Structure formats: structure tokens, C-alpha cells
Image (cartoon, rainbow, N blue to C red):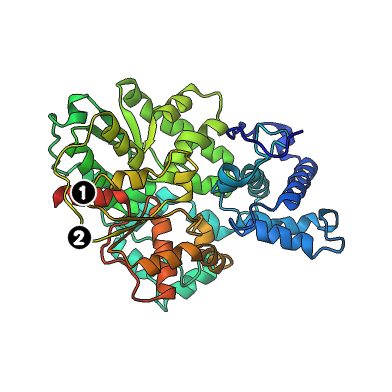
């Protein structure tokens, strides 16, 4: 047996269709096996709050070992996992192909799948995961929805906290008045066929993603603008949410359905030679890695995974293979760029930073730390303060930098960092409203 592994980690398919996956006794035995290995290692102590909670449970147990920790207490460890995959990708020496075969995030997912099957997902969390329903309603009444969800609304936010458990101080994404799909149909973007990528015949089916479609349409408009400038023939495609929110709550069967639906929608575009570009990293991660593990035998899902790029990754690919269109101009200030966990989990490098460094004279300050947001963890009453605590190191960096631009490839992470930085210094907020690095690139083209 080896101590640790020098080999690249590999992920095994999630056996959610097998009876053993749902066997509570076998889940408890596997949890104790994994937790005991984690207890003996403790390398992940400074990642999410799951590991400090686990180690505190053991250290305060009568025997100071896992054998005297009650299985009923494991729920606190499961609750704090954000499925960011950082322990699996960057810290754990015992992931496959090591014989310990340890996959902590997917073990936490298995616990959540058990809870979901037993109807234990809280009402508020279930409502927050209905992204397409919420987005359609929110955009149709955006003025009212944004007023009601605004921080500081003493009428609605305490009520929201009481009914669905969203912390009254948590920043929530605003809704745009029209979806990206509706706006894209009216955009007048002249594609430059003489740009290097245009001459190379590059084509991209842009996955709108739920966040860019309903909440941050500026990200989608910027991406379409940049691709048109570079001669890329584009189509905007939105078959529905990637179901990352459902994955977070353990609703694996719904994730499988979303994967099949999206794969069918993108199949004709891929057949015509289009790349697939996801506008946010969580969605790119789902398409590239999580979906093939949930429906491993589906050839359409596999083809979609192989065709998918993260937005920043795609622009860097254009630059490397063909060169970017000319016309980029210096920015009016420095950029603080956060590399999100779901960007890192794609194992593609700091593509957001690589992309922004293509801008002349760009001064980029990179932070590669967890923002602490982690989906519902960053907004729910029970976990909001914990999420801010986890994101404190990167919030300190952002507050100290005072850059004109503060962006993240994950726009939700960006808002969480801004909120954390404001708590440290209420004058530390960014001057510009850009959220994603693709918006900064589009601005550099506009001059």
C-alpha cells in the first residue's frame, strides 16, 4: 500500500441506480471508513467547514476517535459541503486510483440523495432549486421581485427568512426585465468573418445558463459580442437549467433528466461542428464532468461533455489557435479576479486570468481561494455566517486591493466576495459593475 498518490485523480461513475447505493447501513459503513481516513490525515482542515466540523466531532467524542461519534451527528458535516470538489481535486492524497478510493464530495452527495429520497429536503431549499420557474416569474415582474429581495427591505426580507429560511442579510441576485434569450433575438451584432477565428470557421452554441439567462444577461451579451468580434458564428441555446441546484440537494434523477434533455438539444449543433460554450463555471462543470458520471452510458451526454468549453477557456482557445481580433484597448483601472472553485474543478488552469492578460497593459490581481458561497449555503439562515467566514480570506484580499473591477467566473461568488469585503471596509466596493471577466474583455474591445 502506498502513502498518498502521485497519479492524476480519476472519478468513478455514481452508482445511483444500484440498490446498494440506497442501503442506509452500507452508507453508514462507507461514511465511517472515509471519515476515519480523513481523521488520520486532516490535510483538508482549511477548506470548507465540513472538515472542521468532522474533526471537532471526533476531538470532542468520549474516546476522541470516530468509534464514539454518533452517526446522527454526521448531518452537520454533510450540511457544510458545497460540492466544490476542491478536496478531491487539490488536497486529498487518497482519491482514485489510490486503493483507499476516497471521494468525499460524492459521499456527501450520497447522503443528500438519501435525504431527498426520504423527503427531508427543506421546503425553502426545494423552492430555491426551481430555477427556471423562479427565473420566468422573476423576469416577468422584475421590479417587484427585486424590490422584495433587496437587502434592507424590512418588510419582505424578515418574512422571506421566516418562510423559506433565506437569511435577511444575504445578497440575492436581481432579475433582469427580459431574459437573455429574448434580448439575443434583438441584438445587432455584426460578425467579422475576416477575424482569425472567423477565417478558421469556428462556430459556437452558447449555453445561456440559468444565471445569465435570468439574472445577469450582461454576461451573455458580452460573450456574444466578443465572439462576433472574433468572427465566431454563434447560436444561443437554452434547454433549461443544468440542475446543479438539484445536485446540491441530492435529486440525482432530476439531474439525469436534465442531462438527457440538454444533450438532445445540443446534439444537432454538435453534429454541425459547433463547439458548446457555457457562460458560468458551475454549468460547464456539470456538462463536462458531473453529467457523464450520472448517466455514463449515454453517448449524447458524452459527446456534449467532449464539445464543451467554459467561456474564458473558449476565448483562450481562440487566442492560442488562431489569435484574437485586433482592437483591444487598455482598461481604466486594475482588476481583482477571483478563480472560482468550479473553475478550478474543471482542471483547465486560470483561464480567466489568461484571457484578461490578453488586454494591453492589464493589471490583474488573482485570488484562488473559496468565496464561501457554495449555492444555498451562502444564503440560508443557518449557514450564511459560516459561508462568509469561509470566504473571509478572499474578501480580505479584495478589500485590500480596492481595484476598479472585481470579477469572478462565478458571478454568485463575486457578489458574496463583495458582501464580505463591504463588511470589512464599506468603501472597498468595486467602481465598475462588471461581474464576469468576459464583460471586461468586451469593454476592452469597445474602448
Task: Report whether 273 appears left or right of 189.
Answer: right
Marking on residue 387 = none
Q: Is 409 on the left or on the right of 233, as rendered?
A: right
Q: Quick one: SS at disc 1?
A: loop
Q: Position of residue 146 (x, y in %)?
A: 34, 65
Among the two numbered marks 1 and 2 on one chain, the one whose residue lies closer to the N terminus: 2
Which picture quadrant has residue 273? Answer: top left
Q: Nearer the viewer, residue 175 or 140?
A: 175
Q: Quadrant of the N terminus?
A: top right
Mark 1 or 2, closer to the camera: 1
Residue under circle 1?
Answer: 360
Say which element carries label 2.
loop
Q: Is residue 159 visible?
A: yes
The quadrant in which residue 186 appears is: top left
351 shown above or below 308: below
Confirm whether residue 172 shows in the render: no
Q: Horizontal and vertical percent for residue 343?
A: 44, 45
- Where in the figure is residue 11, as x and y percent of width and height? 59, 34
Q: Name which quarter of the figure residue 296 lies in.
A: top right
Left or right of 127 in this view: 11: right
Circles 1 and 2: CB atoms closer than 8 Å = no
**Total numbered badges shown on the rendered structure:** 2
Residue that appears at 37% across and 70% down: 150
- Graded by Cα atoms within 10 Å as few (under 14), some (14 to 19) or many (20 or more), the crowding at tag 2 reads few
Q: Is residue 253 left or right of residue 363?
A: right
Gap in Å between the C-alphas at discs 1 and 2? 11 Å
Name the residue beneath numbered marker 2: 332
* 172 vs 342, nearest the viewer: 342
Q: Residue at the spot x=67%, y=47% of the render?
A: 111
Amino acid at each position: 500500500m502506498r502513502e498518498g498518490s502521485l497519479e492524476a485523480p480519476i472519478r468513478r461513475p455514481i452508482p445511483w441506480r444500484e440498490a446498494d447505493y440506497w442501503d442506509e447501513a452500507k452508507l453508514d459503513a462507507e461514511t465511517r471508513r472515509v471519515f476515519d481516513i480523513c481523521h488520520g490525515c486532516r490535510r483538508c482542515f482549511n477548506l470548507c467547514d465540513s472538515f472542521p466540523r468532522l474533526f471537532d466531532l471526533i476531538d470532542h467524542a468520549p474516546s476522541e476517535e470516530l468509534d464514539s461519534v454518533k452517526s446522527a451527528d454526521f448531518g452537520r458535516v454533510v450540511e457544510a459541503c458545497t460540492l466544490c470538489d476542491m478536496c478531491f481535486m487539490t488536497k486529498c492524497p487518497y482519491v482514485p486510483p489510490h486503493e483507499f478510493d476516497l471521494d468525499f464530495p460524492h459521499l456527501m452527495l450520497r447522503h443528500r440523495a438519501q435525504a431527498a429520497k426520504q423527503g427531508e429536503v427543506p421546503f425553502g431549499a426545494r423552492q430555491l432549486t426551481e430555477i427556471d420557474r423562479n427565473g420566468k416569474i422573476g423576469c416577468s415582474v422584475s421590479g417587484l421581485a427585486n424590490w422584495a429581495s433587496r437587502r434592507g427591505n424590512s418588510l419582505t426580507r424578515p418574512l422571506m427568512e421566516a418562510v423559506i429560511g433565506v437569511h435577511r442579510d444575504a445578497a440575492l441576485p436581481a432579475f433582469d426585465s427580459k431574459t437573455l434569450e429574448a434580448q439575443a433575438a434583438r441584438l445587432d451584432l455584426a460578425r467579422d468573418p475576416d477575424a482569425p477565428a472567423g477565417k478558421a470557421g469556428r462556430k459556437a452554441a452558447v449555453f445561456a445558463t440559468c444565471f445569465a439567462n435570468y439574472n445577469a444577461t450582461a454576461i451573455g451579451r458580452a460573450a456574444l459580442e466578443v465572439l462576433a468580434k472574433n468572427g465566431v458564428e454563434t447560436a444561443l441555446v437554452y434547454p433549461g437549467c443544468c440542475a446543479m441546484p438539484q445536485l446540491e440537494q441530492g435529486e440525482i434523477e432530476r439531474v439525469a433528466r436534465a442531462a438527457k434533455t440538454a444533450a438532445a438539444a445540443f446534439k444537432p449543433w454538435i453534429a454541425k461542428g459547433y463547439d458548446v460554450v457555457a457562460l458560468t463555471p458551475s454549468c460547464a462543470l456539470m456538462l463536462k464532468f458531473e453529467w457523464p458520471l450520472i448517466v455514463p452510458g449515454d453517448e449524447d451526454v458524452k459527446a456534449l461533455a467532449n464539445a464543451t468549453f467554459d467561456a474564458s477557456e473558449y476565448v483562450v482557445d481562440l487566442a492560442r489557435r488562431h489569435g484574437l481580433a485586433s482592437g483591444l484597448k487598455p482598461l481604466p483601472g486594475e482588476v481583482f479576479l477571483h478563480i472560482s472553485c468550479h473553475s478550478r474543478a474543471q482542471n483547465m488552469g486560470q483561464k480567466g486570468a489568461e484571457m484578461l492578460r490578453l488586454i494591453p497593459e492589464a493589471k490583474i490581481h488573482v485570488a484562488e481561494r473559496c468565496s464561501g458561497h457554495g449555492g444555498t449555503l451562502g444564503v440560508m439562515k443557518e449557514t450564511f455566517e459560516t459561508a462568509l467566514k469561509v470566504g473571509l480570506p478572499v474578501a480580505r484580499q479584495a478589500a485590500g486591493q480596492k481595484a476598479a473591477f472585481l470579477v469572478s467566473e462565478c458571478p454568485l461568488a463575486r457578489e458574496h466576495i463583495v458582501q464580505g469585503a463591504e463588511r470589512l471596509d464599506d468603501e472597498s466596493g468595486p467602481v465598475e459593475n462588471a461581474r464576469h471577466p468576459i464583460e471586461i474583455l468586451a469593454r476592452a474591445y469597445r474602448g
